[in-house]
Amino acid sequence: MPEGDARDVLRVGPTLSIPLAEITFRYETSGGAGGQHANRSHTRVELSFDAGASPSLSEAQRERIVTKLGNVVAAGAADSRSQTRNRELALDRLARKLRDALHVDPPRRPTRPSKASIRRRLDAKRQVGQRKQLRKPPTTD
């Protein structure tokens, strides 16, 4: 494979690519029913990525990921009978986890209630009060 090939990096976002050499792959047999194939073939894939020690991440990215996900980020897949497909699924899941951890929500701008909504709320309160007044027995004056 040539240096810089698209298959030897995990694209997390437009500004972040992680070399697959930084990701630890572990293969094991898938559990459950399936007979000899499931019991003998190492198709289940588990990945782990040490974000705390990764040279691919900037300091801000590392801090954000470690805060949200911890030092080691893991993902796995046993959905398919194919090890290659499970590897792709696990890499996609790892990329999604990292992308979600790096996402920054825009700051919330507090809004004020509109005059119409305030008026509706006060009218509803007034109606409830009047209804309760009507439930009281008449006074003997």
Image (cartoon, grey):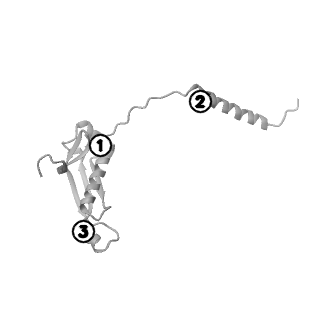
Q: Residues within 10 Å of mark 2 (few under 14, many from 20)?
A: few
Disc 1 residue type (three-letter): Ile
**Label 3 to label 1: alpha-carbon separation:** 33 Å
Q: What amino acid is found at the position of numbered circle 2 in the picture?
A: Ser
Q: Disc 2 to disc 1, how far (Cα)?
A: 41 Å
Report which quarter residue 113 is drawn in: top right
Instruction: Please give the name of the residue rendered at 67% of the width and 30% of the height, measured from the top-left corner.
Output: 123
How many angstroms separate mark 3 from mark 2 (CA)? Answer: 63 Å
Q: Position of residue 57 (x, y in %)?
A: 22, 41
Q: Nearer the viewer, mark 2 or mark 1?
A: 2
Dot 1: few (<14), some (14–19), or many (≥20) neighbours within 10 Å? many
Residue receiving disc 3: 41
Q: Position of residue 28 (x, y in %)?
A: 25, 64
Disc assigned to residue 118: none
Q: Provide the secondary structure element on which disc 3 rests.
A: loop
Nearest to N terminus: mark 3 or mark 2: 3
Image side of residue 2 versus residue 101, left or right: left
Picture layout, residue 101 above or below residue 84: above
Is residue 80 toward the left or the right of residue 20 in the image?
right
Q: Label 2: which residue?
A: 117
